[in-house]
Amino acid sequence: MPPRGAPVFITNHADRFLDLPVVNLSLAEPGRHQRRLLTDELPPADAAAWRLSVGYGAEQGFDELWSVFLAAVDPAAVRALLIGPWWKRDYVPVADTLARVVADADRFPALEALFIADVTSEDCEISWLEMSDVTPVLKAFPRLTELVVRGGNGLRLDPVRHDRLTGLRFESGGLPDDVVQAVAACELPALERLELWFGADEYGGDATIGDLAPILAGTRLPSLRHLGLENSEFQDEIAAAVAHAPVVAQLESLSLAMGVLSDDGAAALLDGQPLTHLKSLDLHHHYLTEAMQERVRQALPGVDVDLSDAEEDDEDEWRYVAVAE
């Protein structure tokens, strides 16, 4: 458990994705999260989520790993793919890696889930990840149901229509405002779960409450059942806006976790529309007083409320979002 007031670091790779066990593949020497691609017996292509990791100091890069992967596993049966560290030494943008994947999109007719940058703090801090435009991924994989993107530096997205996507998550220590605006402008009629980690301004998280207006209006995402507006330095503003947002009526779960939520934001949330229809409300990593925590519990007796990871609200101390650097 990190000390109070300290940022939280991403220390674990996904061990399941699309409810499939993750198999880690690398051409580098095997470590805790790696295995030899050419010597291990591999499971059937549709029985695992495949994580491709170049590994620091590797002699061969992602192109070589990708070619060997295509030869060793039937790509037509692959359902889930995770991209781990794609660089050999210095951090480089993910653009060329994504271009290689997109170029072979027709070989992956069964692909349902893609995780771009399943990278831990040990590999690279989240705010140091060199990202790129992820729009081509959504255009190239029309059968995709789940997309997870980690990292915000250089991240881009254009508004698109995607008819199959049910889950979309952007994890960032600093999510650019134009990416948030693009998400809000996308046509995603099947989307059931949306999570946005806004991060800190000093790491490029320059989104504002106004960028969320189309999402909160509840007209663009008719299938939405879970909304996560998280890891934010303007968490109180988000809570106040959510308190009167039409989208809340269609939700089953809501997360305002990982940010700097204070008593002011919690009070605004409780003073707004009823939340008793929710199955769960996630507020973990917050700055609520014990009195306000008790008020939240009393107001929502039938809701599973997560108030864990309470931070001490000292006016002389800087409030931290959970994930920044």
Image (tube, grey):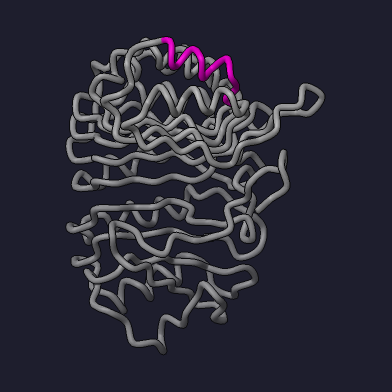
Residue that extends furthest to the right in the rendered view of this protein: 316
Residue at position x 29%, y 69% in the image: 48
Write the residue at 29% across / 60% down.
Answer: 80
Q: Which sits in the foreground, 57 or 184?
A: 184
**What is the magenta segment's predominant secondary structure?**
helix
x, y percentage for residue 230?
Answer: 49, 32
Q: Is residue 153 visible?
A: no
Q: Residue at x 66, y 35 (%)?
A: 311
At 49% from the left and 33% from the top, the residue drawn is 283
User: Is 111 on the left or on the right of 64, as rendered?
Assistant: left
Q: Is residue 35 magenta?
A: no
Residue 321 x, y percent position in the rendering: 62, 34
Q: Is residue 77 above or below residue 190?
A: below
**Image spot of residue 122 (x, y percent):** 64, 60
Toward the viewer: 165 or 52? Answer: 165
Magenta span covers which residues? 261-271
Q: Is residue 264 magenta?
A: yes
Q: Which of the 4 image quarters holds residue 276?
A: top left
